[in-house]
Amino acid sequence: MTQPIRKVLVANRGEIALRVIRACREMGIRTVAVYSTVDESALHVRFADEALCVGPGSAAESYLNIRNLIAAAELAGADAVHPGYGFLSERAEFASVCRKCGLNFIGPSPEHMTLMGDKVRARERMQEAGVPVLPGTGVLQSPQEAVDAAKEIGLPVILKASAGGGGRGMKIVRDLEKLPAMVETAQAEAQAAFGDGSIYVERYVESPRHIEVQVVADQHGNVVDLLERECSVQRRHQKVVEEAPAASLPEDVRTRIRAAAVTAAKAIGYYSVGTIEFLLDGDDFYFMEMNTRIQVEHCVTEMITGVDLVQEQIRLATGEPLAHLDREHRARGHAIECRINAEDPVKFTPQPGTITALNFPGGYGVRVDSHVYHGYRVSAHYDSMLAKLIAYAPTRERAIARMRRALGELVVEGIRTNTALHRWIMRHPAFISGRYDTHFLEANLDPAAILAVAEDQN
C-alpha cells in the first residue's frame, strides 16, 4: 500500500537541492528549503515553496545539524525528507531519526546504509552472494596481520578505511618493510576523517577502470538496473568526468557486471535508487562499494534511459512498485558529464569569490544543472562544484563534439574554474579512444597544454 508524500523538506543545498525541488514540483509535491546564513540568497531558497534557516555558514552547524533539520521539518509540516547527496545523505543516524519522528526518509533504510557503509561487512555480504570481490582481509587487529596478509595476497596491496571512501585513509603498499608504519598512518587518517580507525587490506589493481551500475529497487523485492557509467577520469579518487554507457566495454562484460549489480542489491533486500561500484581489471570486475543515495552523475543515466531518477526515489519511498519500469534497458545514445568547479585548472586549489559574468551553453542535447547566477558569491564553506554540464548525442563521437562546443560557450568570470581542464580532456587522444583508466589524469596531465586551451573557444 502506497503512502503519498505531500511536502518534502530538502536537507541539502546547491544544484541537488534545486534538482529535487524541480522533481517535486512536477509531481505536485510542495517543498521546504533549508539554508545557512551564507545561502540566504541561494536559488534553492528562492524556488522552494517555503524556506527556513537552519544555522550559520559552517556546515556542521547547519546542513549537518540533525536537530535543526528535524525541527525545520516539523515546523513546516513536512511529511518527508530528501537528503540529496553529500552531507547527511548516507548517515544512517539521520535516516533513523527521520523514521522515529514519523518522517519518510527518501532513500534506503538506516540498516542498508549501515551495512553498506561498513566496507568490510559489505565485502563479506557480496562474497556470500557470489559477487566478485578482490582478495582481502577483515578489519586489521595489528600491523603484523597486515604483513601476513600482504605476503599471502601478493604485493602491491592497498590499505582502506572500513568506514570511509573518497581516498581518505587509503595507502598503496609496495614494500613490506614500510607496511607497519603505513598501517598506523592509515588508521590515524581514518580516525580523523570518519571517527573510526578501522582499516583492512585488499589486493591493489594497478590500472583499473571505474565502472558503476545504477540500480533501482522497490520495497517488494524487485530490482532493475539502469545500465552502467564510466567514471575513470578521476583526480585523487574524486570523479571529474563521467559518461554513460561505458565505452570500449565488451558486451559479455557489460552483461555480467549489470547482472552482478542486481544480485548485490537483491542480496541485501535493498530498496530505493543506489549505485554499485566496481573496479574493472581487463575483463574481470570486482565489487568496490555501494552508494546508498542519488549520485552526482545520475544525469548521464537519465539522458540515455529517459528515467527521472529523483522522481523514482520519491515513488519508491511511498512503497510504489517498479511495475512501470521496463525490466530491460538499452542505451539510447551517449551522454558525458563534466563537473565544473571553482578551482584552478592546473593547481586544483579552490577559488571562492563572486561571479561577475556568466553564460551557460544551450542548444539541442545540452543540459546544465547548476545553482549559480550572475553575482553569486562562491563560498569557501562548501564544495567547489558550480555546475554539471551534460552533453547528449546519438553516438559517443558526437557527444564529445557537442561537449567541446558547449565548453566553448561556457563563460564564468570573476573566479577561476576548471573549464580549461575539461576542454583539454575532450581533445586528448586517450579519452577520445575510450580506452583509459583511473590513472588517466595522473599519467597525462600537462599543465602547459591545459593553459594553452584556456582561451581556445573551438
Image (spheres, rainbow, N blue to C red):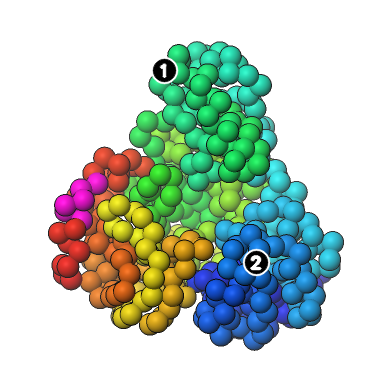
Give the image location of residue 366, x and y in percent: 35, 74
**Is residue 396 placed above or below 131 in the rendered structure?**
below
Residue 86 in view of the camera: yes
Give the image location of residue 100, x and y in percent: 84, 61
Please report whichever mark, 1 or 2, sits nearer to the chain's N-terminal start: 2
Give the labeled residue for mark 2.
62
| In front: label 1 or label 2 | 2
Q: Which amino acid type corresponds to the residue marked 1 in the rendered image?
A: Asp
Give the labeled residue for mark 1.
175
Q: Hey, which quadrant is residue 405 in on the image?
A: bottom left
Disc number for residue 428: none
Judge from the rendering whether residue 405 lies leftward or rightward of residue 131; answer left or right. left
Question: Does the stretch in magenta take in 129?
Answer: no
Judge from the rendering whether residue 450 lies leftward or rightward of residue 65; answer left or right. left
Q: Is mark 2 on a helix, strand or loop?
A: loop
Seen at 43% across and 49% down, the residue is 238
Question: Does the stretch in magenta take in 449?
Answer: yes
Seen at 64% across and 54% down, the residue is 90
Give the image location of residue 368, x and y in percent: 40, 74
Q: Label 1, label 2: how many angstroms apart (C-alpha)?
A: 44 Å
Q: Which amino acid type corresponds to the residue marked 2 in the rendered image?
A: Ser
Q: Hey, which quadrant is residue 81 in on the image?
A: bottom right
Q: Rate crowding at label 1 as few (under 14), some (14 to 19) or many (20 or more) other CA atoms within 10 Å.
A: few
Judge from the rendering whether residue 105 lies leftward or rightward of residue 419; answer left or right. right
Seen at 60% across and 62% down, the residue is 59
| Label 1 with label 2: CB-CB less than 8 Å | no
Residues shaded magenta: 445-450
